Image (cartoon, rainbow, N blue to C red):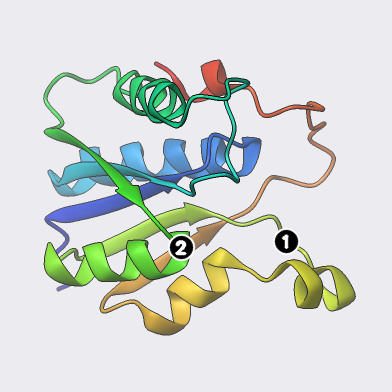
Amino acid sequence: MISVRKILYPTDFSPYSNQAYFHAVALSEIHGASLTIVYAYVPGLTGSGTNDPGADRRHWRNQLEQIRPANPAIPVHHVFLEGDPAAEIVRFAADASMDLIVMGTHGRTGLDRLLVGSVTEKVMRGAPCSVMAVKLPKGLPLSEKPDVEMAVV
């Protein structure tokens, strides 16, 4: 039997991550596992609309802290990482002895994936545990900008 006690859910606040959130919460409930929600801040890349790096970090940390499952019985931890998202997620998963990583994927292929890279793919290759990649169902419309409130319960 597979023992899943610690689930890691990385988010970038995109609709792709939001879809994975529902899977992570459901798996936490099913397995009685804790849920660790992480956001990897990339200085200069993930702007909140301010020119102040300190305010930018506070903005994203605040967004991260708002993500909570509706079920109060799920133990939740929030972790704010800084640096290359894939490397930081893999490092944290190893350091924290995670059993499962549940994350969204944009589903890019071909030239798009080659040019942009895939955080999910890099995490899958380097992770010390299993990784569940969740994509949006076909035909589900995307909003133009990521909607943070979609992930907030």
Q: Judge whether 103 appears above or below 117 on screen.
A: above
Could you tell me how far apart the alpha carbons at marks 2 and 1 are, in whole angstroms? 20 Å
Residue topped by disc 1: 107
Front residue of 55/92: it is 55
- Name the residue type under label 2: Asp
Label at residue 127? none
Residue topped by disc 2: 84
Q: Judge whether 12 appears above or below 73 on screen.
A: below
Query: Split into 4 quadrants, where in the image is the C terminus?
Result: top left
Q: Position of residue 41 (x, y in %)?
A: 43, 45
Front residue of 152/91: it is 91
Q: Secondary structure at mark 1?
A: loop
**Residue sitting at x 44%, y 36%:** 22
- Name the residue type under label 1: Gly
Q: Position of residue 48 (x, y in %)?
A: 57, 24
Callout 1 environment at 10 Å: few (<14), some (14 to 19), or many (20+)?
some
